[in-house]
Image (tube, rainbow, N blue to C red):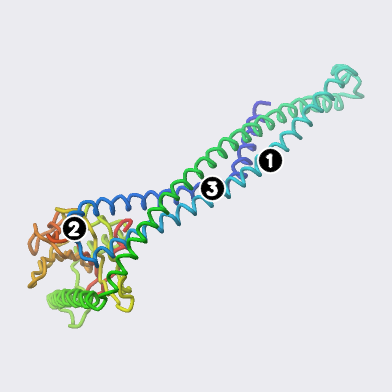
Amino acid sequence: MKINTVTYKIILGIVFLLCNSLGFSQSNKQKALESRRQELRQEIKKINALRLDNKSKEKSQLTLIEDFNYKINVLSNLIKVTNQQANLLTREISANQKRISNLRDELKQLKANYAAMIVKSYKSKNKQSRIMFLLSSYNFKQAYKRLQYIKQYAEHQEKQGLVIKAKALDLQDTNTRLLKQQEAKKKLIAENRVVQKTLEVERKEQQTLMFSIKKNLSRYTAQIKQKQREANKIDKEIDRIIKAAIAKSNKKAGKKKGSAVFALTAEEKVLASNFISNKGKLPWPVEKGLVRLGYGSQPHPIDRSLTIKSNGVRIATEKGAKVRAVFDGEVSEILQMKHVNPIVMIRHGNYLTIYKNLSEVYVKKGDKVKTKATIGEVFTNPSSGETILSFTLSKGVSTENPARWIYKM
């Protein structure tokens, strides 16, 4: 009898798990959304901290527009994610309310059936005792079957009691969960109202600044074009250096000219393989930072007719920020150009990571570096107070999106 009861409890547990599988799935979605929401909130804190740090400095209007655009984008994403959470909670609340209603109906019916069974059992005992029921059997086989029936009836009563208890607990748990969900939804809605107000303020300030800029758009357009020309010049020189290094490695290995990739030694092949296996898990090149400009071609926020070409990402960080190697490798070049801050290039087999706009360099060409090893310090613009690291990742001369390689970029 104990074995049957245990088995029945296990069956009840399995049924309960199956009934709640959708709830678990939604709970996982909520966890993912909450994780993303917290990331966005942390990002806003970083933006505010960087703004406060540079408050006393005279920023260019181009930089201010970039600041506004970035924060508006993060705030908009935060509102979107919070709305998704609230909508999911609404569906969960509705499902739980329906479940509570069904559980109450089921519990009511189970209790009624159980009461009727008890009454029937009591009446049966009054009319005829169990002994008489057994003694009135025609033969031993019938008596055995009647004994089994009495035992099964008693077991059925016990099982019905367990079902009622399980349903009552399920109802209690669902009620508790429902109350928590309702409270969580209220909190999310309240927080979202605050974020929406902040977004409105940011948008108004952005529009005011844009109105001021558009009065003299041609001057700002000229500045944007000049910055792009400077960036292209640096990228062109980096390409030349990489191609020369590839040609040198191939010549040393006795391979034909014109290859777009490095000729690798056995050790370099292992390093390249390890680098690839860590795609999406590489550390940031600075301990604290925000991506101010993403990878690829994109319209400029001030003059949408102009296209910005970015071979990497621009990361805003704090004054005095140290630059870190994102993976094991060898310093292949320290690039010094006229009117350009130092650039460090680190080779990881076929791959290179490039760190631009440094004020100080702590390594030299040929040095072996480990992951997170400090290789320099980011330059801080004395007039604007901005500390920006430009970071590029490439396979040979072909650049790749760093956001696909760096953890949570």
Disc 1 marks a residue whose amino acid type is Ser
In the depicted structure, whether residue 166 falls above or below residue 371: above
The residue depicted at 91 percent of the width and 20 percent of the height is 136
Sort mark 2 into few (<14), some (14-19) or many (20+) by Cα contacts within 10 Å: many
The reply to whether discs 2 and 1 touch (Cβ–Cβ < 8 Å) is no
Badge 3: few (under 14), some or many (20 or more) residues near its Cα, within 10 Å?
Answer: many
Q: CA distance from mark 2 to mark 3?
A: 42 Å
The residue where tag 2 is placed is 325
Residue 60: x %, y % from top left: 20, 65
As helix, strand or loop, the secondary structure at mark 2 comes to loop
Say left or right for 138 vs 209: right
Give the mark nearest the N terminus, 2 or 3. 3
Instruction: Tell me, yes or no, whether the two marked residues, 1 and 3, touch with CB atoms within 8 Å.
Output: no
Question: Which image quarter is the C terminus in?
Answer: bottom left
Q: Which residue is mark 3?
A: 89
Count of residue discs? 3
Determine whether, in the image, residue 385 is placed left or right of residue 401.
Answer: left
Mark 3 element type:
helix
Left or right: where does residue 58 sit relative to residue 19? left
Q: Earlier in the sequence, mark 2 or mark 1?
A: 1
Mark 2–mark 1 distance (CA, rounded to whole Å): 59 Å
Q: Vertically, is 248 above or below 78?
A: below
Q: Secondary structure at mark 1?
A: helix
- What residue sits right under mark 1 in the picture? 101
Can you tell which quarter of the image residue 249 is in?
A: bottom left
Q: Quadrant of the N terminus?
A: top right
Q: Earlier in the sequence, mark 1 or mark 3?
A: 3
| C-alpha gap between disc 1 and disc 3 | 18 Å
